Amino acid sequence: MRDKQEARKILNIYRLFQRDGTLYLNDETDTLDTLFEAVIHAISDCGTLKAKLPYTEFVLPSRKVIEGDSGWVGHFDEKDNRRFFLSDIYDYLYLMYGRH
């Protein structure tokens, strides 16, 4: 049950920024960057949900960016990579936890 609450907390971040499902509809990058930072920190701060998330796709990149790993930071300097990551985590969480 706690993982469902954590997932909804992350999904609410998207709603707060009014970006649930609209990451590709504009070129505005300030909101994208702030959303990205908020989501990777929320993933990193998760408890039970973190153990259920795909590690390589979501947990590892979040942790590495927060740690300042130059490879991951450079990867996510490309805005489309941020958009794909945010879109993927949103879709995953919505499909697994958001519709119930």
Image: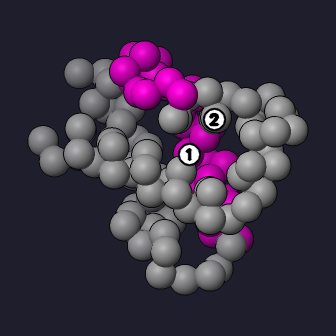
**Residue occupied by mark 2:** 62
**Residue occupied by mark 1:** 39
Amino acid type shown at disc 2: Ser
| Residue 62 place in picture, x, y as percent | 63, 35
- Label 1 sits on a secondary structure element that is helix
N-term mark: 2 or 1: 1
Q: Is residue 2 left or right of residue 71?
A: left
Q: Give the dominant element type of the magenta stretch: helix, strand or loop.
A: helix
- Of badges 2 and 1, nearer the viewer stands 2
Q: Which quadrant of the figure contains the N terminus? A: top left
What residue is shown at x 64% (from left), y 34% (from top)? Answer: 61
Q: Which mark is residue 60?
A: none
| Residue 59 place in picture, x, y as percent | 55, 28
Please tell me whether residue 46 is drawn above or below residue 79 in the rendered image. above
Which residue extends farthest left?
A: 100
| Residue 12 place in picture, x, y as percent | 39, 52
Residue range highlighted in magenta: 30-56
